[in-house]
Amino acid sequence: MSQQTPDRSTPARPARPDASMSLLTNVMDHSLDDGYAEATARRAADGSAGMPRRLRSKLGLAACLVLAALVVTLGAAQARVSAPVLAKEREELIDRINAETKAADDLESQVDDLRDDVSSRQRKALAKHGGDQGGLVALLAGATPVQGPGVKLVVDDAKNTDQGGGGPRESSGFTDTGRVRDRDLQRFVNGLWQSGAEAIAINGQRLTALSAIRAAGDAILVDNRPLVPPYTVLAVGDGKPLDAAFRDSADGRYLQALKDTFDIRTSLSVQEKVSLPVAPSLIVRTAQPHRAADTGSGAADTEKGTS
């Protein structure tokens, strides 16, 4: 009986059920676009295809941190190097400021000493050329302190007036803002002189024949020194008669009108003893003492000049 040779041929593969849908099968089998496949192949050639995205992000962050640490380290090193230089410059600036401040203080002290020396010399000159009445001349000129009976006049702005800048103090007319003006103080002082005052001071500033009461913006100046309200006017004189004469004068009535109409606060009282300081400066540039021996020559010169 003959043996049958076994059939070793590969049996035919059965046909795919989706063979008739070749386009759909191609799309499913090649879902990755050819361009993406090409890019993947290039990255694989560069050796980065196998690196996960999270790992690449961590490496980038680490690189940024290293760069930031390097910048901070370099800045700290530079600051450490420049710190001694800045400290030295600061110390030099402080020393310079202290030196200039001391120089200014020394100059101010010298000015005060020179002012006192000038005032002393002026008082001696007044006493010398005044003869027997040298003390009286010095007293009337404000070169010596004064005390005696008198009156005290206090003038202040109206109660509800803005003290921080309610308008300028200078004025050529009647006040209408409830603020004391420079012209008001001028009238009060002139009224006291006319009523018999022999010496007057405003807020400690002794008045002389050369004194000026002016205003600079929001401040009243007496001999270029600013005053702050309330304004206290002290006058040496025969107390009660001086008080009565001032109240009856036109300037006294002006003071009462300011009080009644604009609520400017005023107070006038008789004082048993009033003390006034020395005038801060006595500067005479033109006038000279008159000597009896020069009378004849002066008259002759006058006659020659008028002929």
Image (spheres, grey):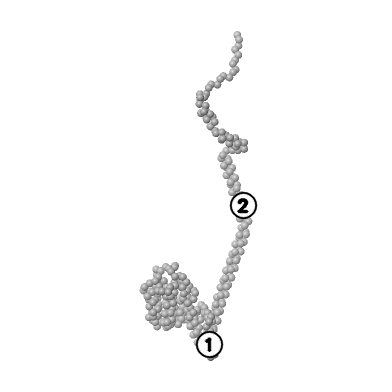
In the rendered structure, are the residues bearing label 1 and label 2 in contact, judged by CB atoms less than 8 Å apart? no
Left or right of residue 206: residue 4:
right
Q: Could one spot residue 265 in this view of the protein?
A: no
Q: Quadrant of residue 149?
A: bottom left
Amino acid type, label 2? Leu
**Where does residue 31 sit, x and y in percent of width and height?**
53, 32
Query: Where does label 1 land, which residue?
Result: 305
Observer-nearest residue: 114 or 38?
Answer: 38
Residue at 59% over, 42% down: 59
Query: Where does label 2 land, which residue?
Result: 74
Q: Could one spot residue 60 in this view of the protein?
A: yes
- Number of numbered discs overlaid on the protein picture: 2
Q: Quadrant of residue 247?
A: bottom left
Residue at 48% over, 83% down: 140
Give the CA separation, mark 1 to mark 2: 91 Å
**Where does residue 54 sit, x and y in percent of width and height?**
56, 40
Please, is residue 178 above or below residue 47 in the view? below
Please, is residue 294 above or below residue 160 in the view? below
Is label 2 in a helix, a strand or a loop?
A: helix
